[in-house]
Image (cartoon, rainbow, N blue to C red):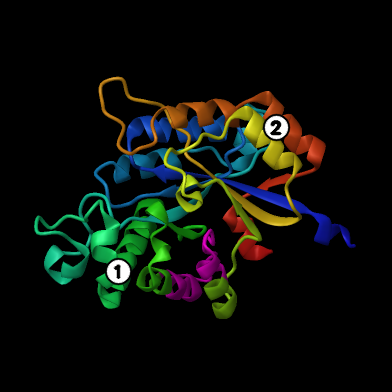
């Protein structure tokens, strides 16, 4: 087997950038001190501008290598985390009535609205979020994924596929239906996906501990794998914005553990982002 066919690439993607300042701080720490190589930005929430400013201020790969020579210098990949369940849409509520409740906000219970949502309204809101991402960061996202795996709804999945095809972007493919649709549409996606209680049916979100990360890395298959994670810090004076609370702190600790980076080196696994997958 050729070396290229045996190579193992790992995209460690931290979801939820822009959800809360404490979460953003944890993700940046997991990038600067740990193995996070990618994140996805929510552009619809009040903290989006500050979150984007923090991302724009990150040093480039050369500068990072000089300041932290023990860590490989690579830019943080930033994708778009499509949101249809938190806060308000970017579109006027009157123009996306099937996506919002009576108060003009997304429903946190996506199961209540999205199965019957109008495909053209989903696509409109996705275009709005893509445009805001580009305005905030001055570039396209490295890839697309969806908060709470909303691509499990066919209309959302189809809108994301059309957007990914139009802009030649990879798409997260955690679900078998999404992987099949990506293959049919010629949209790039990873070989494997790790890290989700939502898809496993577990009641409680588990955390990526040091031991779990080391085991996953040492047993990684060849090709491109995304390891989805949710590192963060907890604000002392605020309730956690999602069901993930202590898990974020535990994952931050695990992602920054020296043994985890040592496992990458021992296994010959290459950290990457979706920007690399787009060119592979």
Q: Secondary structure at mark 2?
A: helix
Picture residue at 32% right of the left edge, 52% below the top: 43
Query: Dot 1 corresponds to which residue?
Result: 115
Residue 183, percent from left and from top? 59, 75
Compute the Cα span from label 1 to label 2.
41 Å
| Left or right of 36, for residue 157 | left
Verify whether residue 173 appears in magenta.
Answer: yes
Numbered range of the magenta stretch = 160-179
Q: Position of residue 9 (x, y in %)?
A: 70, 51
Q: Give the prevailing secondary structure in the magenta stretch.
A: helix
Residue reaching furthest to the top: 236
In the image: residue 6, left or right of residue 122 = right
Q: Residue at x 57, y 39 (%)?
A: 36
Neighbourhood count class around disc 1 (C-alpha, 10 Å): few under 14, some 14–19, many 20 upward: some
Can you tell which mark lies on residue 129?
none
Element under disc 1: helix
**Could you say which is closer to the camera, residue 194 or residue 81?**
194
Q: Residue at x 38, y 45 (%)?
A: 52
């Amino acid at each position: 087997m050729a070396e290229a066919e045996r190579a193992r690439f790992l995209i460690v993607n931290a979801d939820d950038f822009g959800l809360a300042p404490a979460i953003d701080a944890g993700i940046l720490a997991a990038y600067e001190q740990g193995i996070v190589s990618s994140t996805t930005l929510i552009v619809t929430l009040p903290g989006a501008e500050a979150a984007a400013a923090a991302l724009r201020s990150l040093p480039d790969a050369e500068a990072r290598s000089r300041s932290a020579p023990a860590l490989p210098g690579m830019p943080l990949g930033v994708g778009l985390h499509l949101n249809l369940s938190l806060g308000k849409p970017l579109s006027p509520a009157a123009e996306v009535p099937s996506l919002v409740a009576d108060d003009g906000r997304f429903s946190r219970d996506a199961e209540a609205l999205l199965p019957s949502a109008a495909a053209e309204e989903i696509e409109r809101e996705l275009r709005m979020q893509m445009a805001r991402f580009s305005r905030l960061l001055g570039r396209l996202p490295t890839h697309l994924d969806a908060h709470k795996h909303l691509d499990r709804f066919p209309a959302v999945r189809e809108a994301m596929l059309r957007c990914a095809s139009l802009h030649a972007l990879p798409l997260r493919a955690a679900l078998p239906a999404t992987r099949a649709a990506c293959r049919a549409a010629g949209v790039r996606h990873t070989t494997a996906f790790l890290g989700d209680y939502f898809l496993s049916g577990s009641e409680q979100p588990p955390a990526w501990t040091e031991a779990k990360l080391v085991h996953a890395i040492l047993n990684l298959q060849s090709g491109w794998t995304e390891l989805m994670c949710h590192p963060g810090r907890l604000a002392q004076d605020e309730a956690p914005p999602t069901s993930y609370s202590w898990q974020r702190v535990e994952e931050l600790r695990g992602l920054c553990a020296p043994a985890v980076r040592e496992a990458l080196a021992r296994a010959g696994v290459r950290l990457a982002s979706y920007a690399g997958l787009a060119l592979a």
